[in-house]
Amino acid sequence: MDDLYEWFRDFYHTTGINLPFIYDSYDRDRMIDGFLTTVELSVICLFLSVVIGIIGAWLQGSAFTWTRRIVSGYIQLFRNTPPLVQLYFFYFAIGSALPRVETEWGGQAPMLSSFAWAVISLSFFAGAFNVEIFRSGIESVPKSTVEAAESLGFSRLQIYWDVTLPLALRVVLPSLNNNLVNLVKTTTLAYAIAVPEMLYVSAQIWSDNVNVPEMMIFLLIAYFVLVGILVWGMNRWERALKIPGFGS
Amino acid sequence: MSWSDKEPMISVRNVHKSFGDFEVLKGVSFDVMKGEVICIIGPSGSGKSTLIRCINALNDINEGSILVEGQEVNDPKLNKLELRKKVGMVFQQYNLFPHKTALENVMMAPIRVLKEDKKEVEARARALIKKVRLEGKENAYPGELSGGQQQRVAIARSLAMKPDVMLFDEVTAALDPETVGEVLITIKELAEEGMTCILVTHEMGFAREVADQVYFTDKGLIVEHGAPETFFENAKDPRTKQFLSQIL
Ligand SMILES: Nc1ncnc2c1ncn2[C@@H]1O[C@H](COP(=O)(O)OP(=O)(O)O)[C@@H](O)[C@H]1O
Ligand SMILES: [Mg+2]
């Protein structure tokens, strides 16, 4: 390992290409933390946004007009405003309105960290699109299939969970895939509220080392790989869900 | 209120049903005793499907009464689950769950709706699949089965709920002629075992063979009914005669 680090240090001296996040232990540690923060933020937001999509699509099928109105209001709001503004709104407007809490050293701290606000904001942002995506899938499930479940005594919730949702999911996986890829890319916005994710850490490294081009190229490659892993996973999932004789 | 099997298992009284301004059922009454098999025949659009869908509350009714084992179906406080445990239904388009295998289709409702033990349900489901002569197809998905095979899975799926009465809505109408027979045999065996059945059918030969009573509907009314011999030989109403002459 040390040889590798030395090699990159020499590489910098001979070529001028500076990758301190490999050879310098301080920069390396914060880059690893940044990378893990990005992964953690992505995974939590992916999960929560899908949960929001599933619950929202269910509520949109509610018999209560007001429930449906609230859900469509939520979708409109989050779809028609910039995610960065949403993030600022959550962090600065709501975050500062919340009471502060006592820390273990007796100081004062915000109730929710900037990471928590990023999770909330980005999940609701991607969730709004997921609701619409699931909704479109649900509409593609034949009414007669739902009726068959009804006639067997399934409750509305059981029908949704056991019949409608699994069938809808198979139809919407490609659009869900798109939205989730967008979500991973959008996690970089958390930079704006100082969540120490990969872009934020890279910016710190390039201001200390004045190696902007190297860091930019590194970021492009890192996100390319991260999104590639997600797409690969989604494609595997799509194949695993394939049913003989169903769909195309 | 307790029901005894000396009384009709199903008692339909003066049932009216409209879709908007269009009155589909204009006062229909009939009784079905336990173990009886009745066939409903009549021109397309005369309200046959609507009528049997009202019996398991897939459609509500505007006026009249439907008692199933003494339970009033036309009651806003109706416990649909209790009703649907008693009444099985098989549809023209089979409406199997396409993402579940034949065996899973049969097992799903008893496990999810009746919360029965999975092992017991599986044993029962395998026996039912054998009964409808689909041994070896347990793990096939609906998309891999012919129409006739799917329809027999659908029958097994309903039977798995141990219903007291089975409703069949033109269950052979969508089938290739060569697979109609296999489905009819299955239904005939059920009828011979004493299952109470209400069949909407265009298979006159079959109706004649299995029915205890044949009902003829036209434009939302029961025009005429009788035991099959008298009904098919000595129909009195001109509308019945005309219909039979077209079909036979
Ligand atoms: N959900 C519905 N909404 C409006 N009209 C309907 C609906 N279901 C059935 N109808 C109408 O009711 C009439 C009777 O239909 P149906 O009961 O399916 O007749 P049948 O099964 O005898 O062919 C038809 O004219 C049909 O168009
Ligand atoms: Mg019909």
Image (cartoon, coloured by chain):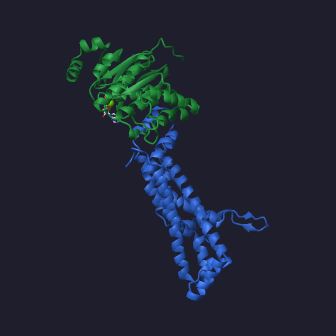
Chain colours: A blue, B green
Taking the view exactly as shown, the residue that stands out farthest to the front is A3
Q: What percent of the width, then of the height, locates residue B54?
A: 41, 28
- The quadrant of the rendered image in which ligand 1 is seen is top left
Res A157 visible: yes
User: Percent x, y for residue B135?
Assistant: 44, 30
Instruction: Where is residue B5? Give x, y as percent.
Output: 49, 13
On the rendered structure, is B96 left or right of A185? Answer: left
**Residue A109 sits above or below residue A70 on the image:** below
Of residues B76 and A162, the one nearer the viewer is A162
Residue drawn at x 51%, y 60% is A126
Task: Examine the image and state in which quarter residue B88 appears.
Answer: top left
Q: Is residue A214 above or below residue A232?
A: below
- At 57% from the left and 60% from the top, the residue drawn is A43
Q: Can residue B51 be seen in the rendering of this structure?
A: no
- Residue sitting at x 56%, y 56%: A47
From the viewer's side, name the closer residue of B145 and A136. B145
